[in-house]
Image (cartoon, helix red, strand yellow):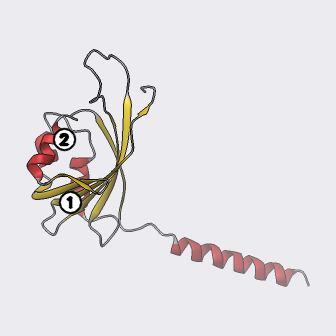
Amino acid sequence: MLKRPVTLICGLAFGMMSASTISASVAPPPPSFIDDIAKQIVPTPTASGFDHYVAVFADDLTVTMDGKQIAPNKVAWVATERHRLGKVDRIVVGFAKGYDALLVIERYDDRSGLSPEMLADPRYTARAVRYAVGSDHLVHNIQIVQTDGILQAPN
């Protein structure tokens, strides 16, 4: 008499597990052009690789930080980014199909407000950066949300 309810419960449990596996399946990979852009953006830009980093941006690129425009075009953004060479660590957080945008978390050591005599005072700044890609497979818009710097011991 006990065998039938146990079989029913086991059957329901198996059905629920397989249904949750199907609904939680892995999302398809991003298009190859998004992957190519991520390969140029994510590694920390160096002087030798800066041209590859810059190549993914459209000439009409606009960049906003916390809702305010900080670069009206590619030239202005490149000038801003050049001083961060070798200082930015990036991780890709995600890509959402249909939005053609890449979300990246950046962390960099910003000592821009310190005197040159200051030897150690790492101020890591964290920002979430959304790179919006156009139909030409170039980045046309960058939206940045940034935190204030925090004191943190270097790694």
Residue 26, above or below 16: above
Hey, which quadrant is residue 10 in on the image? bottom right
Callout 2: SS: helix
Residue 113, image x, y percentages: 28, 29
Residue 18, image x, y percentages: 59, 75
Disc ID at residue 141: 1
Hey, which quadrant is residue 130 in on the image? bottom left
Callout 1: SS: strand
Residue 62, image x, y percentages: 17, 57
Residue indicated by mark 2: 81
Quick one: 37 or 143, which is closer to the camera? 143
Disc ID at residue 110: none
Q: Quadrant of the C terminus?
A: top left
Quick one: 124 or 46, which is closer to the camera? 124
Q: Is residue 63 left or right of residue 108?
A: left
Q: Residue at x 30, y 59 (%)?
A: 102
Q: Is residue 46 left or right of residue 14?
A: left
Q: Residue at x 14, y 33 (%)?
A: 47
In the rendered structure, are the residues bearing label 1 and label 2 in contact, judged by CB atoms less than 8 Å apart? no
Q: Residues within 10 Å of mark 1 (few under 14, many from 20)?
A: many
* Three-letter code for the amino acid on which mark 2 is drawn: Glu
Residue 90, above or below 14: above
Residue 81, image x, y percentages: 19, 41
* Three-letter code for the amino acid on which mark 1 is drawn: Asn
Q: Residue at x 30, y 64 (%)?
A: 30
Q: Is residue 2 left or right of residue 78?
A: right
Inter-mark Cα distance, 1 to 2? 15 Å
Of the numbered discs 1 and 2, the one sitting upstream in the chain is 2
Q: How many marks?
A: 2
Q: Quadrant of the N terminus?
A: bottom right
Q: Residues within 10 Å of mark 2 (few under 14, many from 20)?
A: few
